[in-house]
Each structure stands twice: as C-alpha cells, then as structure tokens.
C-alpha cells in the first residue's frame, strides 16, 4: 500500500513537545508524511486534507480530549475512504480520550479507524514536578517501540480496537471529572501569576497556541480562553510563571528534543 505514493497528514496539538515528538516520529516511520499544528489548521473555516491517511495526535487532558481537538474535528471534512487514526499521549492513564475522538468524528459523519495511547512524561506542574531524567529516558525508549508498532498498523490499514482505560476509570474520571471539569478549563488560567524574575521577553505570549496571553506593561496577562496546555509555564526561560501556590519549587518539564521555535511557529498569529 505504501510505495511512496500514499501520503499522510498528521495534525498535532502539543504544549511541551511529547505529542509533537510522537507526530514527528510517526511521520518518519510512515514516510511521505507531513505534520501540521492544530493551532494553525483551526484558523480555517474548514480543514479538508487530501492525503489518504489523516492522523490526529494530542495530549490527554482530564482523562479526555483537549477542547481544541474537539473543535478541530468539527472543522474536519473527510471522504469515506480516508483512513483516520489518532494517538493520545498521556502521563498516567489515557482514560476515554480516544473513544471521545471516535464519537466526535462519528458526529461529523467520519470514522476513527484506529486509536493508540503512548505513555510519556507528565507535564501538569500544578499537580507534580517533572519525573526524574532516568524514568523519562525509559519512557522515550518505549515511545520509539510503540510508534513503530503504530506505524505498522497504519501501513497495513488495519482497523484495531481503540485503546482506553478500564470501564470504572472511564466512568469516574472521563465520565464525571471530565464532564464537570473540561468546561471550566478556559477560565482556569485565573490561577497563573508571574513573579519578580520575569524579564518581559514575551516568550509566553508567543508560544501560547490560542493567543490567550497579552503583554501589559511588560508582564503577561491571561485572557480566559486557556487550553491549560502549560506551554507558557514550561517555556518561560526563567521559570517566572507560577500556577497557584505549589509550582515555585517544582521541576519544569519539556521534551528534550522540542525547541521553543517549534511552539512559536505553531502559534504564529
Ligand atoms: C491540563 C492537563 C491535564 C492532563 N490530564 C492528564 C490525564 O488526565 N491523564 C494523564 O495520563 N495525563 C494527563 N496530563 C499529562 C499529559 O497528557 C502528558 O504529559 C502529555 O504527554 C503532554 O503532551 P504534550 O507535551 O504534547 O503537551 C495532563 C496534562 C495537562 C497539561
Ligand atoms: S516568558 Fe517568562 S520572563 Fe518572558 S515575559 Fe513571559 S513570564 Fe516574563
Ligand atoms: S495561556 Fe498558557 S496554558 Fe493557557 S493555552 Fe496559553 S500557553 Fe497554554
């Protein structure tokens, strides 16, 4: 099926590089593939990729799918013969994210052919610091293997089961917590604040994928349309951005191969 003719479009959303890394690695395995930031694609009224395979790669948020990904799917227009796959990166449990993707596609008259989870280091500093470097390395080794497996499935145009957590986990976390919490995400930036280390470099403003930060008198101000991706907090070069009271001494996390330019370009206005 491959032979260099079949092309793949991989749309990704990423705050700290895990999903970007998976998207790039998959593109490398599949060849003849391009990666496109969802933050850019979503600016169009419709997204109509012509490639035969279309991938959606994103991080799990609150055991579900980020809202920007759901909005992106609403703009997606695909033909019945296009093969659609999704990959959700997650720190602990994928929950129901991929089933949500399948449902959202179905609502729009499309079908998810296969959905895969890839465990990566967690990036939600409001709850925990970065996992130790050694543990990160182990996860990166597993990621490489998993991406190879995923690429094989996709190349065979296999329709696999959609990966998800257990029924009980999905009922409690993805069902109750996601339903209650996801609608509040946009306002959760009210807990961000900036300390005296801020140098007014405006990197936080530039990396925000949804233009949610405005520099006012040289300091960031959050505009209450947040995706909670943590890019601003993680990419601040002097760790001036805090969330609530507990992040000051927590170790930040970014995928070691991700560069700030990847995020500035993905968010370019
Ligand atoms: C707002 C938010 C919520 C998260 N919720 C979950 C979760 O419910 N389950 C989980 O396993 N990881 C969760 N994580 C961790 C991310 O899914 C994980 O680190 C992901 O690989 C980050 O990808 P990125 O670097 O492409 O942004 C969450 C991260 C953020 C920022
Ligand atoms: S990235 Fe950090 S130092 Fe730069 S403006 Fe934002 S908060 Fe200030
Ligand atoms: S304000 Fe920060 S956490 Fe919210 S979407 Fe922008 S970069 Fe992500």
Image: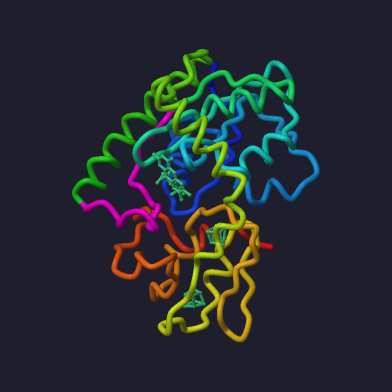
Q: Quadrant of residue 76?
A: top right
- Judge whether residue 40 can be spotted in this image: yes
Most frequent secondary structure within the magenta stretch: loop
Q: Is residue 167 above or below residue 77?
A: above
Residue 22, percent from left and from top:
43, 40
Residue 198, percent from left and from top:
46, 81
Residue situated in front as seen by the camera: 15 or 24: 15
Q: Quadrant of the C terminus?
A: bottom right
Q: Quadrant of residue 53?
A: top right
Residue situated in front as seen by the camera: 118 or 185: 185
Left of 117 or right of it: where is 215? Answer: right
- Judge whether residue 35 can be spotted in this image: no
Magenta segment boundaries in residue numbering: 117-133
Q: Is residue 144 above or below residue 158?
A: below
Q: Is residue 100 magenta?
A: no
Q: Is residue 183 above or below residue 220?
A: above
Residue situated in front as seen by the camera: 89 or 155: 89
């Amino acid at each position: 099926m491959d032979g260099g003719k079949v092309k793949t479009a991989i749309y990704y959303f990423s705050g700290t590089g895990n999903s970007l890394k998976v998207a790039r690695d998959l593109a490398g395995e599949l060849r003849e593939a391009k990666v496109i930031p969802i933050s850019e694609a979503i600016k169009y009224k419709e997204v109509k990729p012509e490639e035969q395979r279309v991938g959606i790669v994103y991080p799990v948020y609150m055991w579900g799918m980020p809202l920007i990904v759901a909005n992106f799917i609403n703009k997606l227009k695909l033909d019945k013969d296009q093969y659609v796959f999704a990959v959700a990166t997650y720190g602990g449990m994928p929950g129901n994210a991929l089933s949500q993707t399948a449902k959202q596609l179905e609502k729009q008259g499309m079908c998810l052919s296969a959905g895969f989870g890839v465990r990566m280091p967690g990036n939600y500093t409001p709850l925990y610091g970065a996992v130790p470097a050694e543990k990160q390395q182990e996860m990166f080794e597993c990621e490489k293997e998993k991406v190879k497996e995923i690429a094989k499935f996709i190349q065979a145009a296999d329709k696999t089961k959609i990966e998800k957590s257990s029924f009980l986990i999905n009922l409690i976390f993805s069902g109750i917590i996601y339903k209650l919490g996801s609608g509040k995400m946009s306002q959760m930036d009210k807990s961000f604040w900036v300390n005296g280390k801020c140098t007014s470099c405006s990197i936080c403003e530039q990396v925000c994928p949804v233009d949610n930060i405005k520099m006012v008198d040289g300091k960031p101000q959050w505009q209450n349309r947040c995706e909670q991706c943590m890019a601003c907090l993680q990419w601040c070069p002097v760790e001036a951005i805090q969330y609530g009271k507990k992040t000051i001494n927590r170790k930040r996390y970014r995928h070691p191969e991700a560069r700030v330019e990847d995020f500035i370009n993905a968010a370019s206005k």
